[in-house]
Amino acid sequence: MKNNQSLEDYLERILILKNKKGNVRSIDLAHDMNFSKPSISIAMKKLEEKGLVIVNKDNGFLELTKEGLAIATKTYEKHCTLRDLFISIGVSPEVASEDACKIEHDLSDETFDCLRKYLNK
């Protein structure tokens, strides 16, 4: 699961940066995640092999594939929902975000869907 968790983290980060900046390169990801450029390169190669990311050879821009975008969106939605829930019960924003990040990868879709429905009542 650790491997899937880190891949989900990369996809989620690409989505967040793309929403902020428009275009994202590996170096942007390295700075944002505080990882080395070689670590990011290895991860991008894995994500490309899995068909989740396309690295544009001309300009270095990272693009999420349809499947990569779906995973990133679902992971980010879980993160935001959990973070907001934790904040609403009095957890500090920093701890809420850290805890949401830990839980978002292991939480089943069934449990998340029920939690979301419950919160939207």
Image (tube, rainbow, N blue to C red):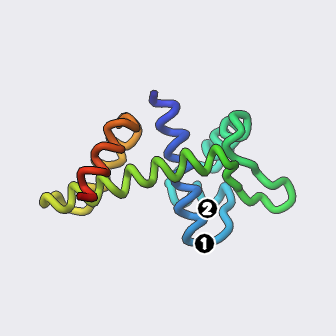
Q: Nearer the viewer, mark 1 or mark 2?
A: 1
Q: Please determine whether, in this image, residue 52 is positioned above or below residue 86.
A: above
Q: Residue drawn 46% across and 47% down?
A: 75
Residue extending farthest to the bottom is: 21
Q: Quadrant of residue 2?
A: top left
Mark 2 belongs to which amino acid?
A: Asp
Tell me the tag on residue 21: 1
Tell me the tag on residue 28: 2
Mark 1 belongs to which amino acid?
A: Lys
Q: Residue drawn 67% across and 35% down?
A: 46
Q: Which one is earlier in the sequence, the residue at label 1 or at label 2?
A: 1
For the question of whether residue 19 can be seen, the reply is: yes
Residue extending farthest to the left is: 90
Q: Residue drawn 31% across and 38% down?
A: 111
- Give SS at disc 1: helix
Give the camera-side residue of 105 and 35: 105
User: Label 1: few (<14), some or many (≥20) within 10 Å?
Assistant: few
Tally the numbered discs: 2
Residue 74 x, y percent position in the rendering: 48, 48
Q: Quadrant of residue 27?
A: bottom right
Q: CA distance from mark 1 to mark 2?
A: 10 Å
User: Label 2: few (<14), some or many (≥20) within 10 Å?
Assistant: some
Give the camera-side residue of 62 and 43: 62
Horizontally, residue 52 falls left or right of residue 108, namely right
Image marks 1 and 2: residues in contact by CB distance under 8 Å: yes
Residue extending farthest to the top is: 1
Which image quarter holds the N terminus?
A: top left
Which image quarter holds the C terminus?
A: bottom left
Tell me the tag on residue 87: none
Residue 101 x, y percent position in the rendering: 36, 47
